[in-house]
Amino acid sequence: MKGTIQTGFGDPGEVLRVGEVATPAVDDDGVLVRVRAASIHIGAVYGVRGLPKVMRPMFKRFIAKSGVIGQDMAGVVEAVGQDVTQLTAGDEVFGSCRGAFAEYASTKVGALASKPANLTFEQASAIGVSAFTALQALRDHGNLQAGQHVLVTGASGGVGTFAVQIAKAMGAEVTGVCSTRNLDMVRSIGADHVIDYTHQDFTKGEPEYDLILDNVGANSLQDMRSVLTTDGLLLANGAPAPSGWFGGLGHPVKVAVSSMFSKQQGRPFLSMENEDDLGTLQDLAAAGKITPVIDQVFPLESAVDAIAFVGEGHNQGTSVISM
Ligand SMILES: NC(=O)c1ccc[n+]([C@@H]2O[C@H](COP(=O)([O-])OP(=O)(O)OC[C@H]3O[C@@H](n4cnc5c(N)ncnc54)[C@H](OP(=O)(O)O)[C@@H]3O)[C@@H](O)[C@H]2O)c1
């Protein structure tokens, strides 16, 4: 089969190639999926670049034995292991695996859910790391309640487009911060208010937000705290692009330290994919409460260009590779 193989850490054009690899084996409790689409989140690009360098041992854990990369995908079940009763060949599924940027990927049955019929394979593949991050940020780390006012920065990106929709589904009032070209898109996915960061600094407003989910890291923590309500919470999810051995890690460390001195701040967090939340996202999608926003669709042969594109950091939703 064809897959996107990583041979080292560096620029996508230097360390990635699309080539022939063995089709992955299926474990007894596993499922082999004929991948129809796989989505790219910004973390996948950091994993290719291997930045910050201190994270390289962790990045290696996301690469399949064959060297193929990619985590989030949707497709059709090709074969199941002997212990699997929940799925059968021909079922349409989405979920996570190692080695998604390929024609076939194998994973545990618990990492998959049935693809909602109202989503395309491209859309279903986008319900991955970015969606889990948005859900867990708002619900678990932000404790967002109906009627509260949440501001989402990077509202046009992979995490932000899910965060705007999930916050609306939770009954919140939502303000999205994005650039001029994305104002209509962010409004169209449900934001009650939009702020164009190229013309307006949201930190110069009134203290009106119960929660800020910052997916960018461009504003100072102090400035962002100034527009929070007294009991408001700042969740610093985004950080400047990683570099060198530790570059990019300073931001979460700063947040963690200043969290000790201000009740208005949430600690940095790492999202985790899990079966329960996959089911929650599946239900939200099937009910039409989240509809993934798809930016560019690349053929598998152009996977290297696709990953380089996402690495530029100007996603309008999520970009995917289609097989
Ligand atoms: N905690 C976790 O486990 C976890 C998981 C996933 C991601 N993350 C982090 O979350 C952050 C966002 O990830 P993502 O996948 O959403 O990135 P992304 O898809 O690249 O989206 C970033 C978005 O922000 C917009 N943007 C750039 N500068 C902005 C500014 N000053 N104000 C408002 N919007 C701005 C970009 O569009 P324009 O440039 O066109 O404006 C783009 O649409 C990253 O730092 C990532 O590392 C954390």
Image: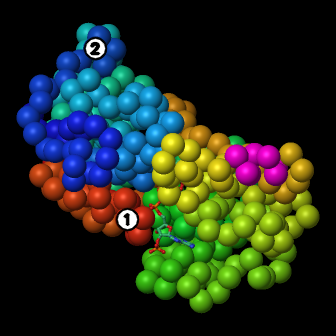
Residue assigned mark 1: 312
Mark 2 belongs to which amino acid? Asp
Q: Does the residue labelled 1 lie within 8 Å of ligand 1?
A: no
Q: In this view, does 224 lie above or below 97?
A: below
Q: Going by the picture, which residue comes out furthest to the front?
A: 244
Mark 1 belongs to which amino acid? Glu
Task: Left or right? Give the position of 145 relative to 186.
Answer: right
Residue assigned mark 2: 27
Disc 1/disc 2 C-alpha distance (Å): 37 Å
Residue at the image point whose x is 80% and y is 66% from the top: 222
> Is residue 245 at all visible to an observer of this figure?
yes
Task: Left or right? Give the position of 271 relative to 60.
Answer: right
Crowd tier of the residue under label 2, counting other residues whose Cα lies within 10 Å: few below 14, some 14–19, many 20 or above: some
Residue at the image point whose x is 12% and y is 25% from the top: 22
Q: Which of 76 and 179 is in front in this view?
A: 179
User: Residues in magenta?
Assistant: 253-259
- Answer with the quarter of the image where residue 225 lies: bottom right
Q: Is mark 2 within 8 Å of ligand 1?
A: no
- Would residue 70 be counted in the magenta stretch? no
Q: Position of residue 292 (x, y in %)?
A: 41, 59
Task: Left or right? Give the position of 160 relative to 45.
Answer: right
> Is residue 209 at all visible to an observer of this figure?
no
